[in-house]
Amino acid sequence: MSELTSEGGHGAVPTGPEVPVEAKPALSRRDWPLYEVFVRGKRGLNHVHVGSLHAPDDEMAVHAARDLYTRRNEGVSIWVVRAADITASSPDEKDPMFAPSGDKVYRHPTFYEIPENVPHM
Amino acid sequence: MSAPPLDQPAVDETALQAYFDATIAAEHRIEPRDWMPEGYRRTLIRQIAQHAHSEIIGMQPEGDWLLAAPSLRRKAILLAKVQDEAGHGLYLYSAAETLGADRADLTDKLIEGKQKYSSIFNYPTPNYADVGVIGWLVDGAAICNQVPLCRSSYGPYARAMIRVCKEESFHQRQGYELLMTMMRGTDEQRAMVQDAVDRWWWPSLMMFGPPDDDSPNSAQSMAWGIKRHSNDELRQRYVDMSVPQAEVLGVTLPDPELTLDPETGKHRFGAIDWDEFKRVISGDGPANAERIARRRAARDDNAWVIEAATAYAEKHAGVAA
């Protein structure tokens, strides 16, 4: 039943051992797996995470996502993915995973001084 | 679903608490996997679940009029509205699940009476104008309560509330328009509207919860940024918004003490019957038993659908593999 965990939703991801959380409640055998839903608002935009829902399978998840998240023309395309299949970094802003990009200021255009009389740059 | 074991130093709760406090103080959002105090998590689960239950139970009073709507136009509008309430419940259960709650478990707790829902939905809807008044007054009060929650400190809750609030505006306007139509009708129709207003006004004021000096959890919820305004503040705002709306509609709000205070520009209003509020919220309202019985029947009578779809999904997953 581990794939039926309800943990997560709205960016559901496993909880790392470094973050103490409440013990998981007993999982109900009556509910379907959790899916995360991504909607493309209109052509030219990325799919954006909008929420989650329970569904028995992928196809039903797409139908349910349409009813739940696009009742008013909010989208032209939907992605659904089982929450249990998402792998994520820790969201913690202090996470060392993002530290290496912090000290590389030379990756930004403002690092370089160009005289003001140089046009189009 | 568990992360691989890592060699971690012992957790320093003081540092985690300090980081949490700093995030709240900076008006940044708390997200699902952040560390949070147990009280914060418990309070949020309780509040979000209660809110979700209210949306789901809230489908019933108006749902009773779906088959008796006076025109196809009104029926289509009412169907869309009731469907929205279901959607709002699901957005909110989904937010509660990010905190480790389980939707089916929350539904069980509702049915067993271990969790509450808004007392307003325990009042009956004997008159078609009730549909309009629920949209105008009840959804109006909900908007007043919910707009500040779009800035709640807990990210998934705030995001769910943004969606909910966008849709509530339709709910309120369709209700008000319905009432305006009835007010342009016959004397009998106008009397129906006034009757509905008389019955719903006071319960609507109770939707903001007990007065501030009798609301023990409020201070902590405000400090945590879960709640943004006190119950009495929001109630006052609601009264001030509703009075001119009632005037335009041409109905009388059933409170002889309702007067505008010229100094503050705010309305003074009569005493709320908190005994009634406590009675209804603890189960003794006109329709509590009926609401829960119907929710229980929906769960139990439809269990076979969940089982059948699960069996179908398992069978086809096996074929694909």
Image (cartoon, grey):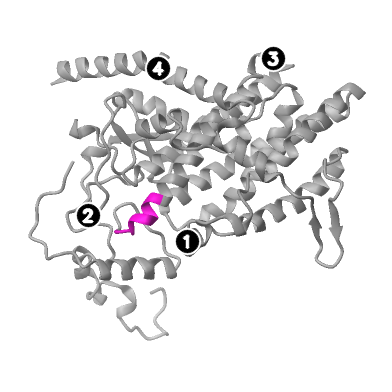
Q: Secondary structure at mark 2?
A: loop
Query: What residue is rendered at 42% in x and 66% in y?
Result: B24
Give, as a three-letter code, the residue at label 2: Ser
The answer to whether dots 2 and 1 both sit on one chain is no
Say which label, 1 or 4, has the lower sequence index. 1
Pointer 2 residue? A89
Pointer 3 residue? B68
CA–CA distance in space, label 4 to label 3: 26 Å
Question: Which numbered disc, 3 or 2, marks the residue closer to the eye?
Answer: 3
Name the quadrant containing residue A35: top left
Question: Which numbered disc, 2 or 1, marks the residue closer to the eye?
Answer: 1
Q: 10 Å neighbourhood of mark 2: few (<14), some, or many (≥20)?
A: few
Q: Secondary structure at mark 1?
A: helix
Q: Secondary structure at mark 4?
A: helix
Give, as a three-letter code, the residue at label 4: Asp
Say which label, 4 or 3, has the lower sequence index. 3
CA–CA distance in space, label 3 to label 2: 53 Å
Residue B214 placement (x, y as % from top left):
59, 55
Range of residues picked out in magenta: B35-42
Dominant secondary-structure state across the stretch colored magenta? helix
